[in-house]
Image (cartoon, grey):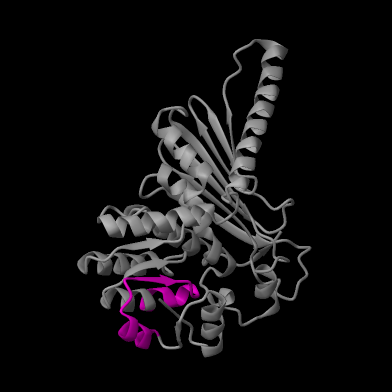
Amino acid sequence: MAVCDREPLMAEQLALRHGIGKWFSDVDAMLDAERPDIVHIATPPPSHLPLATRAICAGCHVFVEKPLTLCHADSQQLVASAIVRNRKLTIGYGFYFDPIARTLRRLIAEGALGEPVHIESVLGYALSGPFGSCVLADDDHWVHRLPGKLAHNLIDHLLNKVAEFMSDRPTVQARAWRRADDTHPASHLLNELRVMLFDQDRSAYVTLTSHARPVAHLLTVYGTKRTARLDFEAGTIIWSSPAALPGPLGRLSCIFGDGIQCFREGTQNVLRCVRGDYHTLSGLNFLINAFYESIRNDTPVPVSYHEILKVAAISDAVFAQLGTEHSRVA
């Protein structure tokens, strides 16, 4: 086992922090010396394609942080490289495998929701937080060099939750802006994004917001039988069904029904906390284990290449539209 960073001191500190015996500042030297079975790439997105390609050519299976690459064509190229060399490739869609997301997927497969009609995916981002503040403080931060800047680094978290419900080529409408009261020196950074997706029988609405409070991470799926509301911050999934009772009694039953579900979800999360599984990396841990199992057993990767490329194609459509508009102040 080894770690690699082009800054030798960073590589050494990471290795010492995690008890890893070897560190490198050159990826080719690491690949030649260690010949790893699996490489995890957690570098800025512009480096994903060349690094993952080199690892695949060296015979490694590869786990890549999102976004896979900067565009659909590059993602296609990377997937094709993995297929040709019979190597497995996956992407860091941790929230896609959060316990509540897995529960939703199972219940939809069982028909509990009916047919999905509309999906809403919301992600709040605190620019004053530990990651956002770094972006704002450094004009040379790699986020500023992404084609879609902040949205480019975050949009996969939103789109991977709705893409599985949409066709391969939904109609896309996108708009991004910054608020007029955003006076930070890095105010050129667009930090509000809205995307509408349309199919013949379904629609989806995607929201990235840096100003709404409290910071939220939500998914709502409206079905012909029931509606599911997922809160990734709280780790809860609440189901809404048509009222079984008439008039005010029906309204009250819905309120108390939601309360009972919240209590049940809270109880389950207490048990998860006791087991050490109530944290934001729970889904990522599941994904990594599933990826390793797919390698050991030569089974399909946890995120299909079809879904990865669908998200990449929708992202391309979003940023193509944003690139044709001038930055707008709300």
Q: Give the total number of marks visible in the rendering.
A: 0
Q: Is residue 311 above or below residue 218?
A: below
Q: Give the vertical position of 126 relative to 240 (above or below).
A: below
- Magenta stretch bounds: 27-50
**Compared with residue 41, is residue 229 higher up or lower down, i.e. above or below?**
above
**Residue 127 sits in quarter:** bottom right
List x then y, in percent, for residue 158.
53, 53
- The foreground one among 274 and 233 is 274
Quadrant where the N terminus sits is bottom left
Q: Is residue 326 visible in the rendered structure shown here?
A: yes
Q: What residue do we see at 52% from left, 88% from top?
A: 7
Residue 121 percent coordinates (x, y): 56, 47
Question: In the image, what residue occupies the spot 33% across and 75% down?
Answer: 36
Quarter in which the C terminus is drawn? bottom right
Task: Please indicate, yes or no, whether residue 311 appears anywhere in the rendered image.
Answer: no
Q: Nearer the viewer, residue 160 or 172?
A: 160
On whether residue 210 falls in the magenta region, the answer is no
Q: Residue 3's image quarter?
A: bottom left
Residue at 31 percent of width and 85 percent of height = 32
Whole-percent x, y for residue 29 in the image: 36, 88
Q: Residue at x 60, y 60 (%)?
A: 176
Q: Is residue 37 magenta?
A: yes
In the shown orientation, is residue 20 left or right of residue 295?
right
Q: Which residue is more in the foreground, 330 or 102?
A: 102
Where residue 31 sits: x, y (%)? 33, 82
